[in-house]
Image (spheres, helix red, strand yellow):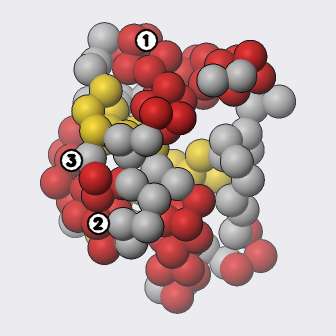
Amino acid sequence: MTRSGRRQAEELAARLKVEAIGAVVSSPYTRCVETVEPLGQALGLRVETSDELAEGAGVRGLRRMMEAYGVQNPALCTHGDLVEELLQYLVERDIIARSRVANEKGGTWVLEFRAREISGATYLPAPA
């Protein structure tokens, strides 16, 4: 991980450690795991990995992960292709406006749930 990437991961951990996160789950790809390790450490949680979050796994796997860990309020780390599919899903269901779609490297989407369905989404830009 680059120095810049490490700094962004630490800033992300600082932003999210105040949330009621009960699980940290990542794609098994090293870069994803490294991104959420500082968050796991800040929360005293082990970073779990799942192939459902791997690049190319598709949005269905991502949605299964959200459902499986939903009651734990998970922090999930995945790849741009899955985020793009998730954003398309959110736009199609009028959860976010197409004009709000953002997917920069290091950016974070915080999802809200009601009755195990996504009811809202807030974007946090990548740490500077």
Q: Which of the two labelled residues, at mark 2 and mark 3, occupies the earlier sequence position?
A: 2
Which residue matches tag 1?
42
Q: Position of residue 90 (x, y in %)?
A: 51, 76
Q: Position of residue 64 (x, y in %)?
A: 23, 64
Q: Which of the two labelled residues, at mark 1 and mark 3, occupies the earlier sequence position?
A: 1
Tell me the element at label 1. Answer: helix
Characterize the local packing of mark 2: few (<14), some (14-19) or many (20 or more) Cα atoms within 10 angstroms: some
Judged by depth in the image, the label closer to the viewer, 2 or 3, is: 2
The amino acid type, in three-letter code, at marker 2 is: Gly
The amino acid type, in three-letter code, at marker 3 is: Tyr
Q: Is residue 80 above or below residue 96?
A: above
Q: Position of residue 66 (x, y in %)?
A: 28, 56
Residue 69 circle label: 3
Which residue matches tag 2?
61
Residue at 31% in and 11% down: 44
Characterize the local packing of mark 1: few (<14), some (14-19) or many (20 or more) Cα atoms within 10 angstroms: some
Residue at 54% in and 22% down: 13
